Image: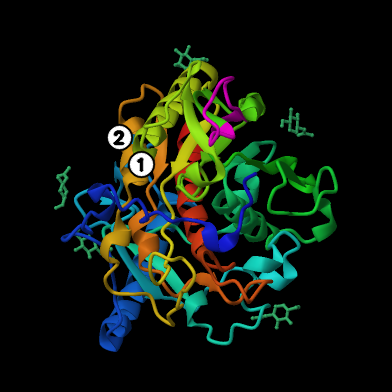
Amino acid sequence: MMIETISNLSKSTSFNKSASFNRRALSSGSPRVSRAGWISRWYHVFVVIGFLVSSLVVITAGYIHVLPSLPLSSPNNGVSKSSYLNETSNGSCNVYEGSWILDDSYPLYNATECPFAEKGFDCLGNGRVDQTYLKWRWKPMDCEIPKFNVQNVLEMLRSKRVVFVGDSMSRSQWESLICLLMSGVEDKRTVYEMNGNKITKRIRYLGVRFGSFNFTVEFYRSVFLVQEGQMPRHSPKRVKSALKLDELDSISSQWIDSDVLVFNTGHWWVPGKLFETGCYFQVGKSLKLGMSIPTAFGVALHTWASWIEENINTNRTHVFFRTFEPSHWKDHTFKYCSITRQPVTDAGERARSIFSDTILEVAKNMKAPINVLHITSMSAFRSDAHVGKWSNNPSVPDCSHWCLPGVPDVWNEILLAYLLNEYDSSSK
Ligand SMILES: *[C@@H]1O[C@H](CO)[C@@H](O)[C@H](O)[C@H]1NC(C)=O
Ligand SMILES: *[C@@H]1O[C@H](CO)[C@@H](O)[C@H](O)[C@H]1NC(C)=O
Ligand SMILES: *[C@@H]1O[C@H](CO)[C@@H](O)[C@H](O)[C@H]1NC(C)=O
Ligand SMILES: *[C@@H]1O[C@H](CO)[C@@H](O)[C@H](O)[C@H]1NC(C)=O
Ligand SMILES: *[C@@H]1O[C@H](CO)[C@@H](O)[C@H](O)[C@H]1NC(C)=O
């Protein structure tokens, strides 16, 4: 009843009725793309100097990852006390405020050679010719994301269970993480899907095991996080199913026993996936026919928050929630998209999303420490990074999903930076 058509995804701006969906981009302090050549050249000089200085710091400190204090317990928006590699900063850094800069050490893997990058996301493999889109690194304004060191990360994850839960955006982050990690595994045959399953759009569960390191990276498809079910009896005719906003997905018990838990939801909360398919909201026994999507999203998030607080031992499990991943459709018909060759300099209204605002708000009020991966505005600049026509179905453009390698790798670098810091400080 809910077919995941690519072009139908992510109509985030299609709630025309609600003005709040067209909020202005943050006008000041929002990230920018540095494009002027001299800036970039000077930047490289700084990077080299910075690298030398920071190498010294690293050596003298005797540590491999210098990411002193990015506490997971800092709820929401990533503002944390952290000096990273930047000694001149006053010690606070919003990781999500910064710019995309060219960096020749990217990309970090070749999707064609990674068995877990699905064909539909392998833009190069599907004929994309321009390659600059592969070369952008995210540079927070006041700090550095530590360079991806695959051996450190593989060791960090030893004997752990990493679980992604959500829609296809979660699946692509899951694929990205596996490809990143496989770049450090010599014998690729030691990495395998535990049930021998292939990646498909509707598959409910995929679990990849890294045999030599005794850890798994898993994906549970749960596009709304809450439970979809049959409509209550005596419902109006147009009601074909109901989304139970006060009940988490029935497979949620399988997420509990994990070390790292990364959620997302958002792209399915659109009329085309809900009302237009006959799916309406339900709370308790009653249908809520008049409830708006943003309100329902908030109710579902509160259900999620209670579930976390009742079920998750945050002494063990690090919980992340990724905010809305912006799409770059040309207009509100969601049929056309034009992929640019460079990131845009002004992300416009895409820099914000009511879903992201709701996630931040709910996380802020939780007792459990939740780390919100607030990637909305940084990703909004990347109009160059979507799949477009370079999918496995070129006749249907895709301006929602991202090419791999690409933007999801950067989400993972931020996730891993937090984890490295967390596991490093807890082992002291
Ligand atoms: C370091 O922090 C200062 C002060 O916040 C900032 O002006 C400078 O651009 C930062 N440098 C780098 C390399 O991040
Ligand atoms: C650090 O600088 C930022 C930006 O100037 C400011 O917002 C913040 O309050 C400062 N933090 C501390 C701990 O001084
Ligand atoms: C990626 O790997 C494929 C298959 O080995 C190869 O044909 C292609 O040239 C590689 N792409 C890049 C950018 O290295
Ligand atoms: C593998 O990881 C599990 C936890 O996921 C742990 O219980 C077990 O002891 C580990 N095995 C080895 C050989 O390290
Ligand atoms: C988590 O750790 C804290 C502090 O060490 C402890 O008080 C608490 O009981 C622990 N909670 C669980 C569920 O183990």
Identified by mark 1, the residue type is Ser
Tell me the quadrant of ligand 1: bottom left
* Residue drawn at point x = 65 percent, y = 71 percent: 122
Q: Is residue 74 above or below residue 28?
A: above
Tell me the element at label 1.
loop
Lower position in the chain sequence, tag 1 or tag 2: 1
Q: Nearer the viewer, mark 1 or mark 2?
A: 2
Please say if the residues under marks 1 and 2 sit with CB atoms less than 8 Å apart. Answer: no
Image position of 16 with respect to 275: above or below: below
Identify the mark at residue 361; answer none if there is no mark. Answer: 2
Residue range highlighted in magenta: 226-241
- Estimate the x, y position of residue 4 in percent, counting from the top left: 61, 53
Q: Is residue 48 magenta?
A: no
User: Relative to 315, is 347 on the left or the right?
Assistant: left
Residue 11 image point, x, y percent? 43, 56
Whether the residue carrying mark 1 lies under 8 Å from ligand 2 is answered with no
User: Would you name the residue on which mark 1 appears?
Assistant: 69
Does the magenta-highlighted stretch encompass residue 237?
A: yes
Residue at disc 2, secondary structure: helix
Can the viewer see residue 230 in this picture?
yes
Q: Residue at x 72, y 59 (%)?
A: 116
